[in-house]
Image (tube, grey):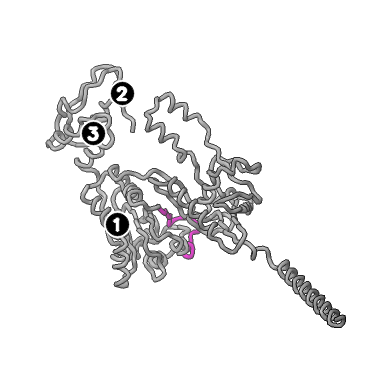
Amino acid sequence: MEPSSSFGKFFYFSYFAVGSYLAKSLLDQVGSLPLHLLYSTVEVQSHDDAYNYLLFWLTKQRFNESKNRLIASTSLSSGLDYFSEDSDDGEFDDMLDAEASDTEWKASLSNTRQLLWSPSEGIHYFRYGGRCLALTRQIEERGTMLYTRTDKLRISCLGWNASILKQLLLEARVEYSQKEKGKTVIYRGAKRSYDNDFYWARSTARPARPLSTVILDHEEKTAFIQDVQQYLHPSTMRWYSDRGIPYRRGYLFYGPPGTGKSSLAFAAAGFLGLNVYILDLNATQLTEDALAQLFQELPRRCLVLLEDIDTNEVTSRRGDESKKKRKGNNKISLSALLNTIDGVAAQEGRVLVMTTNHQENLDPALIRPGRVDYQIEFKLANRNLMMQMFQNLFRDVLPSIDSHLEDTCHRAPIRRPPAHFLPIVSSTHSPVGKGNPTMQPFKSSDSEAMLAVCIRHVNMRLFHP
């Protein structure tokens, strides 16, 4: 028994020693592993839209109230993009809904901007979805110029499953989208100061403009909106794909200045729920590579606006010597612009709108079918459009003006406006001074003169646009 007992003890301690050695080796190996293999991380940089989603979500969380390291600001700004919360807190909308008095409205003008609280630089811990998450914020200053700060947000959790982090970002995106519901977000092509690269910088978010405020022939406006709607429909994309046709659509608005070309583009974007991306082809240091990169970074559903393209010498007719004599800094060739719009590598799914005051000055290659599929001419306002404009401005002031205008504006020629065309206002409220505000007879049938007389005799103290 004794030898056998000694032999068993020997094997027992041998197994223990080997097991201890293997355990120690395993611990040493685990200890030498990089820590990032033990947790999942999602990083968001300030030049991406996801940064706006996440930072906005963080400012709205209750755990911010218990933090002792915060950044106070009146706007969410990364140094690259900027947007203020003043128009998004709902205070002004509440005032409009409640029909606040002039005193309340004037008092609101002196209010300072709303303070926004976000986590400061460093590591912060919080709970979300029953899990403990770590937020790391890193702020870097690049260069000495204004707006050169970059910001990184990093959210981490233990384990290799990043589903909780994806869920958080999805929730942040939904909340941010709700904040901008009913608004048109505008981006502009801009150059970063620290690396000279161009990117789409968020400019502003404005309430969607009603289509009814764009004074244009009703049939022309309706046909344009229906054309864009049909293009954006999923079945249209499949139709293009099945036939091997690039899924792109281009529009050209041309006509005199101030006739509503850009206004229709913004109103259409708001009606269709599209963001607007504005690019100035005359921007200094805009190269062909930067132009191609900007178009590659466009989302699939958006409206790209190129305004006043006739002012760029690149888009003018080839052989136009007067344009060639200009001394410009433009580094973009016409061929590069054409390839960006509809080349093999051109982005698909976007709506391209170009505006010009002089269609005849554009190179035919730029506006041929395939690059420009639909053209709308904007003319100076005629009698009917002037009546629409007047109705749009003064309908709330003069509820019965519709019938009067329709009855009056269809009479030709107009020498003297009817007595019932406008209400007689008291001398104390007349903007033209004291006395009897009687109308003078027209010396011509020009409808512009009729409109001027109408506006001059309206009680402007009752007019709130």
Asked where in the image residue 441 lies, by quadrant, the reply is top left
- Checking the image for residue 228, the label placed there is 1
Which is closer to the viewer, label 1 or label 3?
A: 1
Look at the image and give the residue range highlighted in magenta: 276-290
Q: Position of residue 186 (x, y in %)?
A: 43, 50
Q: Helix, strand, or loop for circle 3?
A: helix
Distance (Cα) linking label 1 and label 3: 34 Å
Q: Helix, strand, or loop for circle 1?
A: helix
The residue that disc 3 covers is: 451
The residue carrying pointer 2 sits among few (fewer than 14), some (14 to 19) or many (20 or more) residues within 10 Å by Cα, namely some
Number of marks drawn = 3
Judged from this view, the residue extending furthest toward the front is 1
Residue at left 43%, top 23%? 103
**Magenta span has 311?**
no
- Checking the image for residue 2, the label placed there is none
Of callouts 3 and 2, the N-terminal one: 2
Pick the residue in front: 338 or 92. 92
Of callouts 1 and 2, the N-terminal one: 1
The residue carrying pointer 3 sits among few (fewer than 14), some (14 to 19) or many (20 or more) residues within 10 Å by Cα, namely some
